[in-house]
Image (spheres, helix red, strand yellow):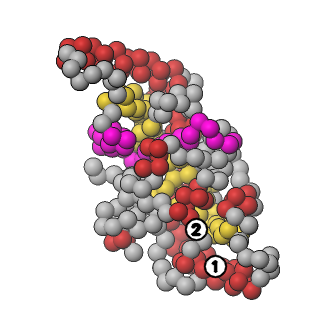
Amino acid sequence: MSARSFSTDLAQLPETREALRIVVGWDSSNSNNTEAIEFAAWLGRSLPVKVQVMSATKSSWANSVSEKKHKKWLKRAREEFRDRVDDALDGVVPRSQRAKHVARLIEKTSSTEPLYDAAQAFNADMIVMGSRAKTSKKRFRPTSVAEELMHSSTLPLGLAPKHVKLSKKGITRVTYALIDSDEISGTGTRDRFPGLAYAASLASVIGVPLRIVAFSPDERSSEFSHELAAWNESTLGLLDRVRDQAFEVSDSLDVQTLLASGRGWKRAVDSVKWKKGDIMCLGSQPSGQLKRVFVGTREGEFIRFAPVPVVIYPRSDAEG
């Protein structure tokens, strides 16, 4: 599958009107959770999109069931799923933004394989997933499928927090998140920042500001410690480099940079002002030669407290 990226042909979206193709992962165990569908619809307020909703099912019958009976069961299950999807999309996703075959039910063979099958057949640009049912408002807890995708997706992965309120105007600001690590603390030497071109191009295509925020869970004993002061100084220099690279994508961008720290990820994230029109982008850690998402422990903990939709951009070791 040859997926597009914002930093190349998707940057021409306003001229070509080529739609962003989104596969929404439907959590069959939590059919009342519509955050992922609402996330896809919200993207459609700012970009042309085509949405397909996908879920996996598994028969509880014994393997000895006849092929005729199995086909009849699967046909009925797909019809019922299509009706449920249509009901969920009504008043949320316009028919013009729905794929021709908007609902796709696949027999389950493994946790994430059906999603990849659907994404490949649909030539998707993004997979969108919702949070677990038992999750606090404006927080994100991955389902088992989302958890696996956070370590294997070859496509940008969209994550929708629980009960998040989204602006009727669509995306009004893009936030690129830098997560505290050796690369931020000053001991790293990285000159490129995964996901930055994606975030900058998204902001440029939509015509909204780009906010670059360096997050750190301040675990030092003193609020004004020398370590924190050193982190602030080194990170300000890094933010200048990130901003310069954002301007390489588009020199007309409205770019703001910000430091955000607090005792733990929750306070660090909550120290930043968020709006209903915010979307947050971040790049994953290197994951070998194959370009895919790999969310480390620190990033995974950080994402749990995201109060706005998140897009994780895949990265490989070859990209440096």
Numbered badge on residue 141: none
Residue at horizontal 48 percent and vertical 60 percent from the top: 295
Does residue 311 appear to the left or right of 266 in the view shown? left
Decide if residue 93 is in sight here: no
Amino acid at pointer 1: Thr
The mark total stands at 2
Q: Residues within 10 Å of mark 2 (few under 14, many from 20)?
A: many
Q: CA distance from mark 1 to mark 2?
A: 10 Å
Direction from residue 230 to residue 296 in the image, left or right = left
Residue at 39% x, 52% y is 153
The picture quadrant where one finds residue 242 is bottom right
Q: Is label 1 in contact with label 2 (beta carbons under 8 Å)?
A: yes
Q: What is the secondary structure assignment of the residue under circle 2?
A: strand
Question: Would you place residue 179 above or below residue 24 in this image?
Answer: below
Q: Which contiguous range is marked in magenta?
A: 110-137
Eyeballing the image, is 152 above or below 320? above
Where residue 178 is drawn, which disc sits there?
2
Residue 94 x %, y %: 51, 28
Quadrant where the C terminus is found in the figure? bottom left
Q: Amino acid at mark 2?
A: Leu
At horizontal 51% and vertical 20% (from top left) the residue drawn is 87
Query: Is residue 132 in the magenta section?
Result: yes
Residue found at x 53% / y 69%: 246
Tag 1 secondary structure: helix
Q: Which residue is mark 1?
A: 235
